Amino acid sequence: MAAVVTPVLTAGIGEADLRDIAVYRGRGGYKQWERAVRDLKPADIQAACDASGLRGRGGAGFPTGKKWSFLPNNDKPRYLVCNCDEAEPGTFKDHMLLEETPHLVLEGILLGAYAIGSHHAFIYIRGEFKAGYAIFMAALAEARKAGFVGKDLFGTGYDLEVTVHRGAGAYICGEETGLLNSLEGKRGEPRLKPPFPAVEGLYGAPTVVNNVETLAYLVPILEKGAAWFASVGTEKSKGYKIVSISGHVNKPGNYEVALGTTVNELIQIAGGMREGRKLVAVQPGGGSSACIFEEHFDCPYDYEHIAKAGSMLGSGAFLAFDETTDFVAAAHNMVRFFAHESCGQCTPCREGGHWLEIVLRRFVEGRGLMSDLDMMRRVSSTITGLNLCALGDSIEPFLKSVLNRFPAQFEARVLKETTHV
Ligand SMILES: Cc1cc2nc3c(=O)[nH]c(=O)nc-3n(C[C@H](O)[C@H](O)[C@H](O)COP(=O)(O)O)c2cc1C
Ligand code: SF4
């Protein structure tokens, strides 16, 4: 596959003022929304979503249509919540969509809500996204004025309200149940599952939480057809993905590509390595993911191949590291982030993260102990898999991967004249 960028959600960004509803409509915007409400049943959108192979772009890659199918049939209201918390280290695609093409984000939310039979959708916007919040609020006001949000839409009797909620800058509020608690005005602490949000979510009612990018893809899927989306990608990873490429590349940025584009091709797309240096590691799925190395740089960037290579695609945050990287400092930085963002409910996450941060800080300062090296390698069994949410499992993959690959960098930071072990 050639190293190509294919603007789908990103089409028009940088060329036209997509924040202006007239411009967005001039490019076909809100046509799918009107068609859906007038001519399609929710089941039609669900079927299109299933046939497209769309999987959640928020991190776990769960099939979107399947997630919707878990909603029970009862007399409770149903809610759709768009997750725009986007705090995963290295991810910067959702707030770009929010700021650059807010009507597309809104149209995706409207379609998602209609597909699950909801009359009330929410968008949870990370507190720091002040510009994105203001831009989205303006877009929502325009859409309401145009008759796309509110009561009796297109004269069909269908009502749909959209509520915008701002977070306060906690990474854990991106986790769907932490987000729902925060939305309800409680502490943003993840809930014990089951029950899953589909059964008991916002205000105890059936709820779907979907990522911004996931929902936005509903618009082109309806416009161009599920078969169009499914024709691109690999066997189980269909369609396109916005990859946030950063690190030691010449042109960091958001690049929309077909899933299955290789790791090496993504580096080319981002202008190659800075100063012609050598790529030695890639963190393919944000701060939570393990690094992959040279033997996997020809690997297709999709959910299955990246998992087989020992990591995960996550939300599509792709960090490239060259041979000048201080992996001890990088590991400390990553662990410090997770330790700081732990909500503290689970002992392994709360204590393990904090303790690992202290040990790694010693290495950064050249005061590491030789015995810490093996102990850090073993520590995953006391943290990973033993927590309420996936934040706890995010603490050690990056550390473990670089510790095993570049042990000399850590050994060089061991205190030389140590008298104790
Ligand atoms: C600690 C943590 C933080 C998360 N942050 C986000 C986030 O900022 N945005 C997001 O869409 N999903 C985030 N997720 C994943 C969500 O819990 C959820 O799976 C996702 O919003 C579902 O959307 P999708 O099915 O469209 O991928 C996070 C998960 C964890 C464990
Ligand atoms: S794993 Fe960490 S962040 Fe998640 S609920 Fe437990 S303590 Fe909180």
Image (spheres, rainbow, N blue to C red):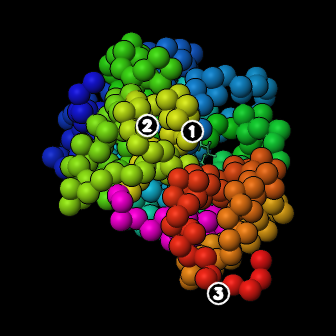
- In the displayed structure, 103 sits above or below 240; it is below
Where in the figure is residue 56, as x and y percent of width and height? 54, 34
Query: Where 101 falls versus 3 (above or below)?
Result: below
Nearer-the-camera pick, 397 or 199: 397
Badge 2: how crowded within 10 Å, few (<14), some, or many (20+)? Answer: some
Left or right, residue 149 beside residue 31: right
Position of the C terminus by quadrant: bottom right
Q: Are marks 2 and 3 in contact (CB under 8 Å)?
A: no
Q: Which residue is mark 3?
A: 417
Q: Which stretch is magenta?
A: 322-341
Give the SS element for disc 3. loop
Dot 3 amino acid type: Glu
Residue at image coords 27%, 24%: 1
From the image, tell me which residue sits under label 1: 310
Disc 1 crowd, CA 10 A, few/some/many (<14, 14-19, 20+): some
In what element is the residue under mark 2?
A: helix
Residue 18's x, y, as percent? Answer: 25, 46
Q: Earlier in the sequence, mark 2 or mark 1?
A: 2
Disc 2 target residue: 296
Q: Nearer the viewer, mark 3 or mark 1?
A: 3
- Report whether 221 appears left or right of 397: left
Task: Classify mark 3: residues with Cα within 10 Å, few (<14), some (14-19) or many (20+).
Answer: few
Q: Nearer the viewer, residue 201 or 245?
A: 245
Q: Quadrant of residue 342?
A: bottom right
**Amino acid type indicated by mark 1:** Gly
Residue 418 location, quadrant: bottom right
The reply to whether callout 2 and callout 1 are in contact (CB within 8 Å) is yes
